[in-house]
């Protein structure tokens, strides 16, 4: 979470600066970056929902297939762990893209 919280403002700052500087006549590099901004959000959205669905499916299958899982399910620590696992699976694609963008954009000068 901390890495994501640090990477997001860096990426947003770089992209918003490029958008402000190249708004009248964006370069080819700017147009590619602006296209990537939208395309990666759509891809991350679907990857995130898919990862959360798979994690939820696995948690449900574990509940169904284990004879003692039903009793374990009622403990709040188990429910919390399962819930955080599902949320973590959903954040993983977003984290992966944001940190990759931060590394990539850190190498490029804004101006």
Image (cartoon, rainbow, N blue to C red):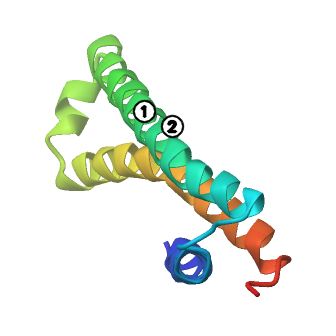
Left or right of residue 108: residue 56: left
Marks 2/1 in contact by CB < 8 Å: the verdict is yes
- Front residue of 107 and 83: 107
Which of these two is toward me, 56 or 78?
56
Q: Relative to 96, is 47 above or below?
A: above
Left or right of residue 30: residue 90? left
Residue toward you, 77 or 37: 37
Q: Position of residue 43 (x, y in %)?
A: 51, 37
Give the quadrant of residue 19. Answer: bottom right
Q: Eyeballing the image, is 52 above or below 93?
A: above
Q: Quadrant of residue 109?
A: bottom right
Mark 1 Cα-neighbour bin, 10 Å: few <14, some 14–19, many ≥20: some
Q: In the shown orientation, is residue 73 left or right of residue 2?
A: left
Of residues 77 and 47, which is closer to you in this image? Answer: 47
Judged from this view, the residue extending furthest toward the front is: 24
Q: Residue at x 62, y 69 (%)?
A: 25
Residue indicated by mark 1? 46
Q: Position of residue 2 (x, y in %)?
A: 53, 79
Q: Image height check: is 60 above or below 83?
A: above
Secondary structure under badge 2?
Answer: helix
- Where does residue 81 sit, x and y in percent of width and height? 34, 51
Outermost residue, bottom direction?
Answer: 111
Instruction: Give the residue pinned by disc 2.
Output: 43
Structural distance between the alpha carbons of marks 2 and 1? 5 Å
> For the residue carrying disc 2, how many other residues have a C-alpha within 10 Å: few (<14), some (14-19), or many (20+)?
few
Q: Please name the residue shown 64% across and 66% down the image.
A: 26
Farthest-out residue, left:
74
Where residue 91 appears, as percent x and y from the top left, is 45, 53
């Amino acid at each position: 979470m901390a890495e994501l919280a640090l990477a997001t403002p860096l990426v947003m700052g770089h992209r918003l600066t490029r958008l402000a500087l190249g708004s009248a006549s964006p370069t080819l590099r700017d147009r590619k970056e602006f296209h990537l901004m939208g395309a990666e959000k759509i891809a991350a959205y679907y990857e995130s929902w898919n990862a959360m669905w798979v994690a939820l499916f696995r948690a449900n299958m574990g509940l169904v297939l284990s004879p003692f899982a039903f009793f374990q399910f009622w403990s709040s620590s188990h429910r919390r762990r399962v819930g955080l696992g599902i949320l973590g699976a959903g954040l993983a694609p977003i984290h992966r893209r944001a940190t990759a963008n931060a590394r990539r954009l850190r190498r490029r000068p804004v101006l």
